[in-house]
Structure formats: structure tokens, C-alpha cells
Amino acid sequence: MNSLLFYIFKLSTKFSMIFVFFLAILFNNFEGYAQNKDFIVVLDAGHGGKDPGKVGYKKFKEKDIALNIVLQVGKLLEQQQNVKVIYTRKTDVFVELKERGSIANKADADLFVSVHCNAHHTQASGAETWVLGTHANKQNFEVAKAENSVILLEDNYKINYKGFNPNSPESLIGLTLMQEEYLDQSIQLASIIQDGFTTKLKRKNRGVKQAGFVVLHQTYMPSILIETGFITNTKEGTYLNSKIGQQKFSESIFKGVTKYIEQLNLNTIAIDEVEAIDNIKKDEVTEVSEEDSNVFFKVQIASGSRKLVTKAYNFKGLNNIDRIKIGNSYKYYFGNTSNYSEIKKMHSIAKSKGYSTAFIVAFKNGEKISVEEVLKKS
């Protein structure tokens, strides 16, 4: 009897240890997943299926070149740790503009990259990268108009786009509202991509531009549209349709995306920026008065309807980010100090990271108060 009880005890202990071990693995994996969320990149090959896009020199089709480049970019990104790639199309099929944005939004993507080719009746050449905008520029409108005209091939486009007319400049007004909070990041990525095209690939630099692209309007994350080059140009069209040309563009876009991700994943402020704060001279320090000892300064860098995780990769490498919900929107603040000289330094850092509209705010006992009033008392 004693030996039987001893055997049961050993067996129960063994199962308890296995159960505890299983729970440990489960929670560790969950914690790892929460802390190491995949960076989701949606790659969009322009046009497809019944929509060939632009047709250029020797009948080169935009839809084929864009798809080949996107698939190669995706293959390179899929080899990166913690990067997940989603495609709006992987074959020669027609995908509505509305659906392309929907794919990215449903995936809660971190980035949307749409690849296209340009065309012109002259021998125009060069690469350009676009972000969403409604600048009153006739040339920019014509580019957006050409890309947006694909919606006329879609079924029920008047319903899906609520009467949007790709031929009307007025229809573009307001397109930027939903994308506005991501414009800084979109420009950041576009600038990196464009720099790679011009410095590494030696493409003619046609710049980073803004126009009202419907496919970018549909997305709720940093988004860009790349015009790799002109397939109507004899030399450039041949290069874009070649294996080596598509490989070079793919590698350049891949390097641009990974560089952008690296910039977002910075976990600390650069050392020289930290030293700039730490080395503030004593006679430059402005402390709040004893009466306002519960006052703290912050730098407001962004606001919007989307709830973002306050990690450095979401704020261009800045850490020490606070998120406060006000009504139906969220405000994001950088820094937290009672030292006004220090917050001014942090304000400069935020602006250097691209937050050009950042400004200093003050809080007392959790309530927002006037910065001017605090400084007068100090």
C-alpha cells in the first residue's frame, strides 16, 4: 500500500511539473509576442488583371514590372526577423483600390508601399516617390488623376467611393484628413527611398511629392507610392523591364524599408542628444516655484484618433512617450520634467526628428494649464 501511494505521489508530482513547465512556456511565448510584435509591411503592386496600367516602350506593361519588383522586395523582407509581409496581389489579377487599402487596414499594418511605373509622351525619365496630399499643382493633379482613373474599371465604384470623380480637382479636397497624422512618417520613408534611388541607383531625382492618390487615402498607416521610372523612355523602360533593373529597384526599396524600420526601432535618444540635456549649465536652469512644485512640462508631438503603442518605433525613435485620451482622440507627449530648460531641449529634439509642429505644454496635478502663467510665477 505504501509503495502504491509513493508511486501515485511521484506520478502526480511529475504531471504537476509538466503542467507548470507548459504554463511557463505559454506565458513566456505570450510575453515575447507582446514585446516583439511583427512589423507588418503591405506591398502593393499597382494595377493588374484587366488593368495593365501604363503601356510603354516595346509594349512593356506597368502591371508586370510592378508585380515583379514587389515580389522580390517581399522575398527580401520575409528574411528579416520580426517583419511580416502581406501582398495586395501576388499574381496578375485585378484588385480594386478600395480593397488594397482594406487589406492593409485589416492587417493593422505598420507600412503600406505601392509600386508603379510612370509614362509620358516625351522621353521623360527619373524616379519619384509620393505621399498623400492635395497641393494645388496641376502637374501633380494629372499624375494622381492617371493613377486614380482605375476606379472607373471597378463595379459599383460610385457607391464604393461615394461619388468620387478622379477627373475633378475638387474631389481631392479632404482626402488627406485621415492620413494627416501619418504624413511625417510617410515623408520620412519616401525621403529614404528616394535618396536610395538617386544615390545608389543613379536615377534622375524627381523628388518626394504630394498628390491625392485614392489608394493612399484608403490606408490608416504611413503610406507611400513609388513611381520607379518611365516605361515610355527607351533606355529607362528597357532597364525597368530587365531582370537586373527589377533586381536593383527591389534591393533599393528593401534597403529603404529596413532603414526606416531601424530608425523607428531606436530605443534611446542619441548619445549626443542626451549629453545636450545633461550638460545644461546651472545658470540656464529654470525651475518652477515651490508654489507650483506639482507642475510638469511635456512636449506634445502628435494627436489623432488612432491608439498607438507608446514604443520608440512608433515615434521616430523617441522614448518616454505618454498617451492621453481626450474625448475620442489621443494626444501623445514626449518627456516629463519640472525643468523648463530641459523641456526646451527636448522640444528641439522632437523637432529635429521631424515633429515640426511640436509644442510645449504644462500640467499641474494632472490638469493642463497655461505654460505662460507658470513661467510668470517662476
Image (tube, rainbow, N blue to C red):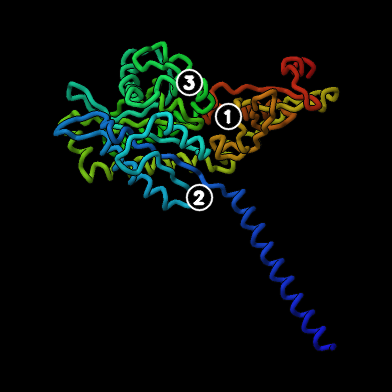
Q: Please name the residue that numbered disc 1 is placed on.
A: 350
Q: Nearer the viewer, residue 87 or 34?
A: 87
**Front label number (2 vs 1):** 2
Count residues near mark 2 (Cα–Cα under 10 Å), then give few for <14, some for 14-19, many for 20+.
Answer: few
Q: Position of residue 256 (x, y in %)?
A: 40, 40
What's the amino acid at mark 3? Thr
**Residue at 21% of width from left, 31% of height from top?**
231
**Residue at 62% of width from left, 38% of height from top?**
309
Q: Nearer the viewer, residue 85 or 368?
A: 85
Is residue 284 something one can see in this rendering? no
Q: Position of residue 12 (x, y in %)?
A: 76, 75
- At mark 2, the secondary structure is loop
- At mark 1, the secondary structure is helix
Along the polypeptide, which appears first: circle 2 or circle 1?
Answer: 2
Say above or below: 45 vs 297. below
CB within 8 Å, label 3 to label 2: no
Residue 82: image tag: 2
Along the polypeptide, which appears first: circle 3 or circle 2?
Answer: 2
**Front label number (3 vs 1):** 3
Q: Position of residue 127 (x, y in %)?
A: 29, 30
Q: Quadrant of the N terminus?
A: bottom right
- At mark 3, the secondary structure is loop
Residue 176: image tag: 3
Q: Quadrant of residue 51?
A: top left
Is residue 37 something one can see in this rendering? yes
CB within 8 Å, label 3 to label 1: no
